[in-house]
Image: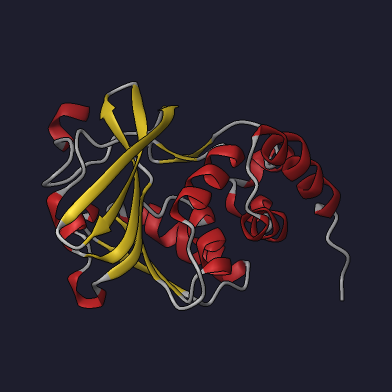
Amino acid sequence: MPVDPYTGQRHQMVEGQIRSRGIRNERVLAAVEKVPRHIFVPADMLGMAYDDRPLPIGDGQTISQPYIVALMTELLDPHIGDRVLEIGAGSGYQAAILAELASEVITIERIPAVAAQARRNLAAAGCRKVEVVLGDGTLGYPPKAPYQGILITAGTPEVPPPLTGQLADGGRLVAPVGLHGIQELVRIVREGERMRRDTHGGVVFVPLIGEFGWREEDEQ
């Protein structure tokens, strides 16, 4: 079996950037240390794959900072047996992390070239539990609903109603909610017809475009 030259960098990333900032879920830490992040960044950025920063992946999209990926995953807390819906596939990295922890991951991407990139990267990483769907993520994906976890990886003015409607009882939804430029990281837990909501600090994400998000013409 070939030696992964990035193993040490992933370990340093987890210990120096993630555990040191308060992420305590050992399952999440193990998943982040296992998934080869360098596969999910552009070839000309391999040297920055494990840096403490988001990176551009083309088409105006980014791969999130490792700590933010870990934080959102810890808040979602997926388990084996769960079906998880991700809104915004990007390069596929977050979906690959989720797939280490859940039984099935559906990730929706609206940009065809980005969806194709995610499929290639996930295949290269040997990740077989993720389905990449091309479409408007603000509408969710009714064919596989309900979901025990829903993760939105783009900034939304409010949580799209179709997504809360597809959340299973006891399920969790994590999303950056707010204005352009800065959002608040929000977790919603469904308790019957009640949606319990808490917040977890400021974040910055690209905008969520779609029927229940920002309008594409506003981003021109």
Report the residue that reaches farthest toward the top: 181
Q: Residue at x 22, y 29 (%)?
A: 219
Q: Residue at x 14, y 36 (%)?
A: 215
> Horizontal and vertical percent for residue 216?
17, 37
Asked which quadrant contains residue 17, the reply is: top right
As displayed, is residue 67 above or below residue 151? above
- In this orientation, which residue lies closer to the viewer: 10 or 23? 23
Q: Is residue 87 visible?
A: no
Looking at the image, is 198 positioned above or below residue 167? above
* Pick the front one: 110 or 29: 29
Residues 44 and 26: in front is: 26
As drawn, is 84 to the left or to the right of 209? right
The colour style of the image is: secondary structure
Number of numbered discs visible in the structure rendering: 0
Q: Quadrant of the C terminus?
A: top left
The image quadrant where one finds the N terminus is: bottom right
Q: Quadrant of residue 30?
A: bottom right
Is 107 above or below relative to 220? below
* Whole-percent x, y for residue 185 in the image: 38, 35
Which residue is at a point 65% across and 52% down the rendered structure image?
37
Q: In percent of the image, x 40 and y 53: which residue is there?
A: 114
Give the x, y percent position of residue 69: 53, 45
- The relative height of residue 82 versus residue 163 in the rendered view (above or below) is below
Can residue 72 be seen here?
A: yes
Residue 24: x and y in percent read: 65, 47
- Give the camera-side residue of 176 and 51: 176
